[in-house]
Structure formats: structure tokens, C-alpha cells
Image (cartoon, rainbow, N blue to C red):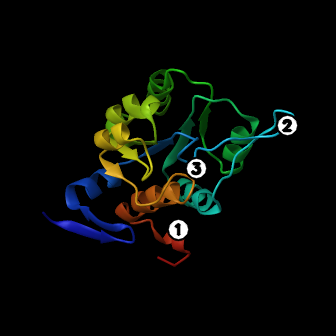
């Protein structure tokens, strides 16, 4: 089995090729962008923590020409604010059936499922992990999700997994210099 050596370990060449075909990265939020924990204040205020490296990766990926989107089951102003700041092109919140939003994205962008990578961490993400051309589970995803994924990140959700995914897409497409600041 021939592999490509990356910052995140060796990746089988055929899997690495699938990263190179990605035109759209779609992500779940809780457990992928965040560590999955939700902090609630006494007055019902909801807080989430986002990793700055993940944000940098998303901005670099967008600069490389790959479109970005999030599809999440929860609705939160925090998510809206963070994703707008990262220039995420499509934000779908409150999605009990994530497949409808996924199909809408494919239609809007004129893409096939083979051109999409989807990353998730729990059973509501399984349908999209199976539907996408590249289904990704974060390192600490539920075991059933990891079993169905094409790739399991080395980093945990909320701790650099999004950056890892962005880096691998850019590396496979010859655009990693956008994430390192190096010149072409």
C-alpha cells in the first residue's frame, strides 16, 4: 500500500487523492468545531469554545478556493457569529434532518456528492458521512461514526480537527502554502 507522508501521519494514496477532489467542506459544529461541551450560565446563557487554529484553517481553505459550510442540529447566535467571522459560505442551523440541507447545498453550488467532504462526530452525522465523497470522523467521535468514516482525524473535535482537515485538503491540492504563510 503506497502512502503519502503528511504532518498528520501517512495517508493511503487513494484516500489522499479523494482529498484533492474536494470543492466543498461541510462540518458539524458541536463536537467538531467545539469539543462538544455546552456551558450554560444561571440565566440560560450558552457558551462554546472554538479553537483559533481551526479558524485559521477555515480562512486559509476558503482562500484556496474551497467553499465551506456548517450543518448543525442546534441553533445558536454564538455559532452564527463565529461562522460569519470565518466567512463560512453557508450556515444551516436547527437541522433535524441534515440531509435536506446537504442536498440543497449540492444544488446551489452545482456539485456532486463526490466533491464534498463532511466531518462529524455523532450518529446524526452518519447519513452525511456516508453520502459525501469523503466522510470524516473526528478522533473522539462516537465509535459508530468512526466505523463508517473514510478518514478519522488525529486531532480531537474542538482541538484542531478542523485545521487538520483543512490542511490535508490544501496539501492534496498544492495549496498548503496558504496555511503556512510560505511563498509559492
- CA distance separating discs 1 and 3: 26 Å
| Identity of the residue furthest to the bottom in this view | 183
Q: Quadrant of the N terminus?
A: bottom left
Tag 3, which secondary structure?
A: loop
Q: Badges 2 and 3: C-beta atoms under 8 Å apart?
A: no
Q: Considering only vertical position in the picture, is 137 above or below 163?
A: above
Percent x, y for residue 13?
21, 61
Q: CA distance from mark 2 to mark 3?
A: 21 Å
Relative to 95, residue 14 above or below = below
Residue at left offset 28%, top offset 58%: 16
Camera-nearest residue between 176 and 136: 136
Looking at the image, tell me whether mark 2 or mark 1 is earlier in sequence order: 2
In this view of the protein, which residue sits in the foreground, 183 or 46?
Answer: 46
Please tell me the numbered disc located at residue 42: 2
Q: Residues within 10 Å of mark 1 (few under 14, many from 20)?
A: many
Viewer-closest of 44 and 74: 44
Residue under numbered circle 1? 178
Marks 1 and 3, the one that precedes in the sequence: 3
Asked where in the image residue 10 lies, by quadrant, the reply is: bottom left
At 15% across and 66% down in the image, what residue appears?
2
Residue 153 location in percent, x, y? 40, 56
Q: Horizontally, is 139 left or right of 151 in the view? A: right
Amino acid at each position: 500500500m503506497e502512502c503519502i507522508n503528511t504532518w498528520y501521519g501517512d495517508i493511503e494514496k487513494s484516500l489522499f487523492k479523494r482529498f484533492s477532489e474536494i470543492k466543498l467542506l461541510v462540518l458539524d459544529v458541536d463536537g467538531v468545531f467545539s469539543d462538544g461541551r455546552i456551558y450554560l450560565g444561571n440565566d440560560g446563557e450558552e457558551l462554546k469554545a472554538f479553537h483559533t487554529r481551526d479558524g485559521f484553517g477555515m480562512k486559509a481553505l476558503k482562500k484556496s478556493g474551497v467553499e465551506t459550510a456548517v450543518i448543525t442540529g442546534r441553533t445558536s447566535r454564538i455559532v452564527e457569529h463565529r461562522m460569519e467571522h470565518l466567512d463560512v459560505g453557508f450556515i444551516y442551523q436547527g437541522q433535524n434532518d441534515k440531509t435536506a440541507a446537504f442536498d440543497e447545498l449540492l444544488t446551489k453550488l452545482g456539485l456532486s456528492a463526490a466533491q464534498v467532504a463532511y466531518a462529524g462526530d455523532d450518529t446524526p452525522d452518519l447519513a452525511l458521512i456516508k453520502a459525501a465523497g469523503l466522510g470524516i470522523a473526528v478522533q473522539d467521535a462516537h465509535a459508530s461514526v468512526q466505523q463508517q468514516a473514510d478518514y478519522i482525524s488525529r486531532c480531537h473535535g474542538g482541538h484542531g480537527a478542523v485545521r487538520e482537515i483543512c490542511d490535508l485538503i490544501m496539501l492534496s491540492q498544492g495549496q498548503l502554502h496558504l496555511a503556512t504563510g510560505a511563498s509559492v
